[in-house]
């Protein structure tokens, strides 16, 4: 059953929130040992569903079951960021996005696995074991929102929330074969998100279809007095207008081809793009993004510096353990890298240079959007590797080569499936200028419908 139909059944009383929650809860307990997508399940979800049924709340998410990445606070549930640092930290408040979900009748079923403190692109860096890809359990899910993508793909929930700093929603969406969206910077409140890099982080939705991601984003978006980076923009109901019936200029860039390690991926996305252009009579234009190759090198000095700064609160005094004493290899690499970069003798030189490069890439994207309405690229440059395979750090960092530019530019980007290669899902990424999510969703819907 598609999500729109299910929501209609819930509203009409043909399916109860209790039955919906119970079916997912039972499936998680029965099947998630194979996937490891949830770190903690909300054992009170059935009682919460019963209270919802008795209430007058018939909100836009009425009775839908939602998983939440373990880096986002949900009151009463353990939000440990998949780290021993906060292993027993139970959230004392709801993140803004969680409050909005509850206000609209959504039910939080549990906290999903992820790379530790969102540090990773494979889903293997959790202190509680890797998340396995439901599309092929021998392969990585991608990261860092590994559990959120896997839980949706395995049908353990209707929708899920992830966070995206350089591709952490879109990367696993591509590998698992689901729909994932990174909203424009400033569209969704980050209050309640345990940050990786606050100048880049965004919370966004994952779903099995474009409609679900559009619906969830329309609920969680909007100005918040608790997040000073928010823009006061009117939020449309994205899910109500997914039909592509306007003139669109599609941008493609040969520089992405040069970054694609497996040419089959680029060819598949190129074919899907050609089909989209032909079916909807769109205009295709080549754009130049010559500095896009510097995105990964620009991104990591920013992340190292901001992650190091953000983790100084994890000193083991107020809660949890000192992060340096218990975190994994990737988290420690970023902490130590940030510590070196921010040493007084460097006077912020590397961070400032990265900020300058970020502005160059951002301006390059803005110049491109003067010519085109969207830019289409692959979501990832290579297929997912086998869990446990030893790959160079540089190779894992390169997984986000196509997704990082959207974070640096503050624009919106979504991933929808282009097809499969060797039975493995491959995502197509659609980038649009800031606060053009409506246009992005229409294009994603067009790709989805074929």
Image (cartoon, rainbow, N blue to C red):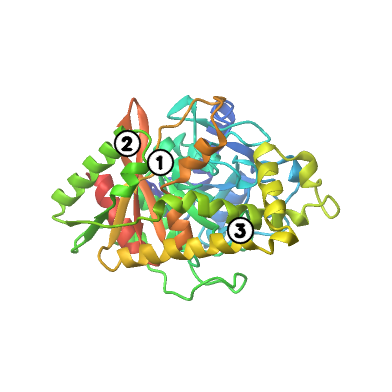
Where residue 10 sits: x, y (%)? 43, 50
Cα distance in 3D space between marks 3 and 2: 34 Å
Out of 247 and 433, give the one closest to the viewer: 433
Mark with earlier residue (3, 2): 2
Q: Tell me the crowding category of disc 2: few under 14, some 14 to 19, or many 20 or more residues within 10 angstroms, Cα based.
A: many
For label 2, the SS is helix
Q: Residue furthest front?
A: 345
For label 1, the SS is loop
Image mark for residue 300? none
Where residue 110 sits: x, y (%)? 60, 44
Question: Residue 87 vs residue 399: left or right?
Answer: right
Front position among marks 3 and 2? 3
Identify the residue at horizontal 47%, vertical 41% (top origin): 398
Image mark for residue 380? 1
Cα distance in 3D space between marks 1 and 2: 8 Å
- Regarding residue 102, the answer to whether it shows in the image is yes
Q: Tell me the crowding category of disc 3: few under 14, some 14 to 19, or many 20 or more residues within 10 angstroms, Cα based.
A: some
Residue to which mark 3 is pinned: 350
User: Is 413 placed above or below 3 here?
Assistant: below
User: Is 383 placed above or below 336 here?
Assistant: above
Within the image, what quadrant is residue 111 found in? top right
Count of picture labels: 3
Q: Tell me the crowding category of disc 1: few under 14, some 14 to 19, or many 20 or more residues within 10 angstroms, Cα based.
A: many
Tags 1 and 2 touching, CB below 8 Å: yes
Residue to which mark 2 is pinned: 265
Q: Residue furthest bottom?
A: 232
């Amino acid at each position: 059953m598609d999500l729109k139909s299910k929501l209609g059944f819930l509203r009409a009383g043909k399916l109860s929130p209790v039955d919906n929650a119970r079916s997912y809860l039972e499936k998680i307990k029965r099947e998630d040992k194979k996937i490891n997508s949830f770190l903690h399940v909300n054992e009170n979800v059935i009682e919460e569903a019963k209270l919802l049924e008795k209430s007058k709340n018939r909100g836009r998410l009425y009775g839908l079951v939602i998983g939440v990445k373990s880096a986002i606070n949900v009151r009463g549930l353990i939000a440990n960021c998949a780290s021993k640092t906060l292993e027993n930290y139970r959230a004392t408040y709801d993140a803004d996005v969680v409050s909005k979900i509850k206000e609209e009748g959504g039910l939080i079923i549990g906290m999903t696995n992820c790379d530790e403190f969102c540090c990773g692109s494979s889903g293997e860096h959790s202190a509680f074991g890797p998340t396995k890809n439901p599309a092929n359990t021998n392969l990585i899910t991608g990261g860092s929102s590994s559990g959120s993508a896997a839980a949706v793909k395995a049908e353990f929930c209707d929708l899920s929330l992830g966070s995206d700093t350089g591709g952490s929603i879109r990367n696993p969406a591509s590998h698992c074969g689901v729909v994932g969206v990174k909203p424009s910077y400033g569209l969704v409140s980050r209050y309640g998100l345990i940050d990786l890099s606050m100048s880049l982080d965004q919370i966004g939705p994952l779903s099995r279809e474009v409609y679900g991601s559009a619906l969830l984003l329309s609920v969680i978006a909007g100005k918040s007095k608790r997040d000073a980076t928010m823009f006061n923009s009117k939020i449309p109901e994205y899910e109500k207008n997914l039909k592509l019936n306007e003139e669109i200029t599609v941008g493609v860039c040969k520089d992405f081809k040069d970054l694609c390690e497996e040419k089959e991926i680029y060819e598949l996305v190129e074919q899907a793009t050609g089909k989209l252009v032909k079916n909807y009579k769109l205009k295709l234009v080549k754009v130049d993004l010559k500095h896009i190759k510097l995105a990964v090198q620009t991104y990591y000095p920013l992340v190292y510096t901001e992650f190091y700064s953000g983790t100084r609160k994890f000193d083991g005094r107020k809660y949890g353990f000192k992060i340096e004493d218990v975190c994994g290899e990737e988290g420690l690499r970023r902490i130590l890298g940030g510590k070196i970069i921010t040493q007084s003798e460097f006077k912020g030189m590397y961070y400032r240079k990265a900020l300058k490069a970020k502005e160059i890439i951002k301006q390059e994207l803005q110049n491109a959007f003067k010519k085109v309405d969207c830019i289409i690229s692959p979501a990832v440059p290579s297929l997912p590797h086998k869990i446990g395979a030893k790959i160079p750090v540089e190779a894992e960092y390169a997984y986000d080569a196509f997704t990082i530019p959207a974070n640096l530019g503050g624009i919106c980007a979504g991933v929808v499936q282009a097809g499969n290669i060797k039975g493995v899902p491959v995502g197509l990424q659609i980038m649009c200028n800031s606060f053009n999510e409506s246009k992005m969703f229409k294009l994603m819907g067009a790709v989805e419908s074929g």
